[in-house]
Image: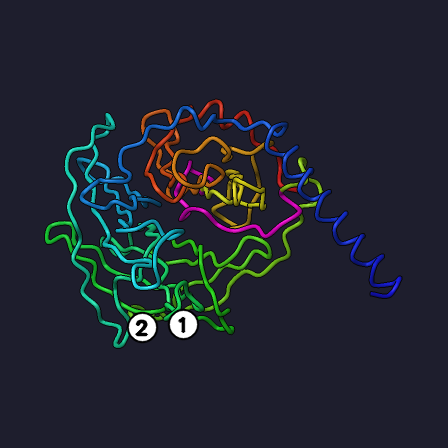
């Protein structure tokens, strides 16, 4: 190895060590508005016969109860053999507004996408449009040797009476999609359906034709995050956690996240709440510190807290999350505490 290569290798190792130390400091020193210890778990390994766990619950406020859809896995994906990877079924939960779990049912998936198994869908986020309930979710294209090499974003209609998900298709955007597409946000506004594709850059689309799922970009702006402290929000990829919900007369609320690799935690997740102006449909406020962070989660991956849905119930914002890619949980924060934490998005 030449002297130049030796120096380059040393600098690379030093940079990796500094990144690791920085991530640890974020873990222990960065405050969050909600402590993960406050989370209430309602499903996990063994639930409904899924030994690998039940995780990443999408939720929606129903007329009488809270509707929740999550993915059951026969074997946790991190230790699954190639033939067992991502195998399982979606589950439909009904939860009272006092947070009592009322019932759990497996959902039958009606597959309208030729050549693709519905067993490969996960990460269900629920939304309403035209007085019907839908779920946007990921669809994994699995490899024979295990894992997946492509991830599509698809939409299904949820029928709670028959407990079915009917796959509709893949949204058609007016730009090329990536090989792996995750974490999109859908919401209805003024009887039109919008798709928040990404937060940084901020890309918003509107449906032009339903149900062929053709969308057109209506907003595309760079997101300035340089003002924000701690800089964890600046350092790595920022992605959407939840579908936006109506927060008050002037704003929608969406949860976003970032993650960083930290040794035994595998990945350490941080979540923030963002308010979007209902007139401009642009972000205008963000929490002054993370809303929720990983590090003390239950399951095989203690750094992974993955929020999938936010609901307003009484005077609380309630977050539904996956813990350790193994459990489903919820946690509450009073709106007045959350409101006091918002700072202007510069």
Return the residue found at the far bottom: 114
- The label shown at residue 212 is 2
In this view, 281 is above or below 296: below
Magenta region: 233-252
Q: Label 1 crowding class (10 Å Cα cut-off): few <14, some 14-19, many 20+?
A: some
Q: Tell me, yes or no, whether the two marked residues, 1 and 2, touch with CB atoms within 8 Å.
A: yes
Looking at the picture, how far across and down is residue 221, in whole percent?
61, 58
Q: Is residue 102 left or right of residue 138?
A: left
Residue visible at 42% across and 46% down in the picture: 242
| Circle 1 residue | 172
Q: Is residue 241 magenta?
A: yes
Residue 95 image-quadrant placement = top left
> Residue at horizontal 27%, vertical 33%?
42
Q: Residue at x 31, y 62 (%)?
A: 120
The image quadrant of residue 219 is: bottom right
Quarter of the image with the N terminus is: bottom right
């Amino acid at each position: 190895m030449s002297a130049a290569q030796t120096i380059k290798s040393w600098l690379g190792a030093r940079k990796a060590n500094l990144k690791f130390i920085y991530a640890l400091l974020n873990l222990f020193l960065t405050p969050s508005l909600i402590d993960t210890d406050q989370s209430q778990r309602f499903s996990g390994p063994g639930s409904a016969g899924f030994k690998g766990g039940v995780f990443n619950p999408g939720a929606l406020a129903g007329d009488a109860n809270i509707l929740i859809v999550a993915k059951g896995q026969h074997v946790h994906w991190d230790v699954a053999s190639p033939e067992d990877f991502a195998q399982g079924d979606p589950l439909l939960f009904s939860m009272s507004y006092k947070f009592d779990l009322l019932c759990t049912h497996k959902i039958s998936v009606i597959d309208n996408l030729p050549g693709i198994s519905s067993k490969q869908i996960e990460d269900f986020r629920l939304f309403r449009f035209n007085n019907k309930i839908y779920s946007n979710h990921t669809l994994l294209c699995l490899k024979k040797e295990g894992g997946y090499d492509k991830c599509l974003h698809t939409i299904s209609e949820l029928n709670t009476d028959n407990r079915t998900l009917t796959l509709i298709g893949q949204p058609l955007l007016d730009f090329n999609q990536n090989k792996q597409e995750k974490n999109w946000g859908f919401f209805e506004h003024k009887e039109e359906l919008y798709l928040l594709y990404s937060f940084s850059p901020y890309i918003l689309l509107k449906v032009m034709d339903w149900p062929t799922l053709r969308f057109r970009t209506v907003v595309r702006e760079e997101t300035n995050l340089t003002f924000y402290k701690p800089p964890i929000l600046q350092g790595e990829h920022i992605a959407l956690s939840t579908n936006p919900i109506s927060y008050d007369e002037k704003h929608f609320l969406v949860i976003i996240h970032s993650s960083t690799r930290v040794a035994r935690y595998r990945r350490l997740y941080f979540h923030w709440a963002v308010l979007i102006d209902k007139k401009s449909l642009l972000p205008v406020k963000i929490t002054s510190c993370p809303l929720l962070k990983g590090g003390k989660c239950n399951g095989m991956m203690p750094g992974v807290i993955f929020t999938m849905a936010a609901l307003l119930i009484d005077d609380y914002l309630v977050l539904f999350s996956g813990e350790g890619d193994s459990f489903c949980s919820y946690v509450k924060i009073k709106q007045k505490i959350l409101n006091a934490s918002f700072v202007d998005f510069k």
